[in-house]
Image (spheres, rainbow, N blue to C red):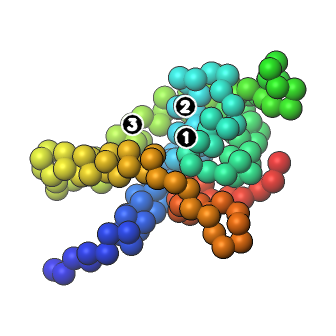
Amino acid sequence: MTHDRRLFFLLQRATRAAIARANTSTLERLGVSVAQLGTLSYLAQRQGCTMTDVAALLDLNKPAVSAMLARLERAHLIRREPNPRDGRGTLLFLTAKGERVRLASRPVFQRAISEMVEGFTANELEVVFRFLNVLVERGKHAPSPRNPLGSRARSHASPVDSTREER
């Protein structure tokens, strides 16, 4: 079997395939996407965070995060409260329903991860994890690219929640 050796291409394809597969499971079983579950998990640990915090976590632009948060709010998984330090902003909180969905996601993710790593040894997985963590760490220090039109270019098209709606 010939293996593709185009690293950037493979990273993008692998990310999209893994997220798509996980999204299928989470949407069917829980009614929410991987990005939405990531947001619920983040809020469980950081009640009262801002939309900017969530955007940074998921590496998404603010309009995409705003749309996702609106869907979570309509589903009664999160609630917003006015930010006392910023009259224009809101603080985000996980609801009891959001916590139930977050907890229900654990076995769904455990199964997805088990399927993903099936056939790999612990040593092979350790190399994969080390490689991916190094890429993430190096990416934190890389300057953000700018496109020729002067707007900030995204380093990648987000595989986690590509819906683009305005507030």
Is 59 situated left or right of 79 in this image? left
Question: What residue is pinned by disc 2?
Answer: 42
Q: Distance between the residues labelled 1 and 3?
A: 23 Å
The kind of residue on which mark 2 rests is Tyr
Q: Which residue is depicted at the point 21% across and 76% down?
A: 3
Q: Are marks 3 and 2 in contact (CB under 8 Å)?
A: no
Category of crowding for the residue at label 3, using alpha-carbon neighbours closer than 10 angstroms: few (below 14), some (14–19), many (at least 20): few
Which residue is at the far top? 84
Q: Residue 143 carries which label?
A: none
Question: What residue is pinned by disc 1?
Answer: 57
Residue 98: x and y, percent? 62, 29
Residue 159: x and y, percent? 52, 59
Foreground residue among 137 and 104: 137
Q: Distance between the residues labelled 3 and 2?
A: 18 Å
Give the answer, above or below, for where 30 lies relative to 162: above
Is 3 situated left or right of 76 in this image? left
Give the answer, above or below, for where 3 lies relative to 163: below
Residue 54: x and y, percent? 62, 38
The mark that comes first in sequence, 1 or 2, is 2
Secondary structure beneath label 3:
helix
Q: Are marks 1 and 2 in contact (CB under 8 Å)?
A: yes
Category of crowding for the residue at label 2, using alpha-carbon neighbours closer than 10 angstroms: few (below 14), some (14–19), many (at least 20): some
Foreground residue among 166 and 87: 87
Foreground residue among 29 and 63: 63
Q: Which residue is depicted at the point 38% across and 45% down?
A: 137
Residue 91: x and y, percent? 73, 26
Q: Which residue is depicted at the point 58% across and 37% down?
A: 39
Question: What residue is pinned by disc 3?
Answer: 107
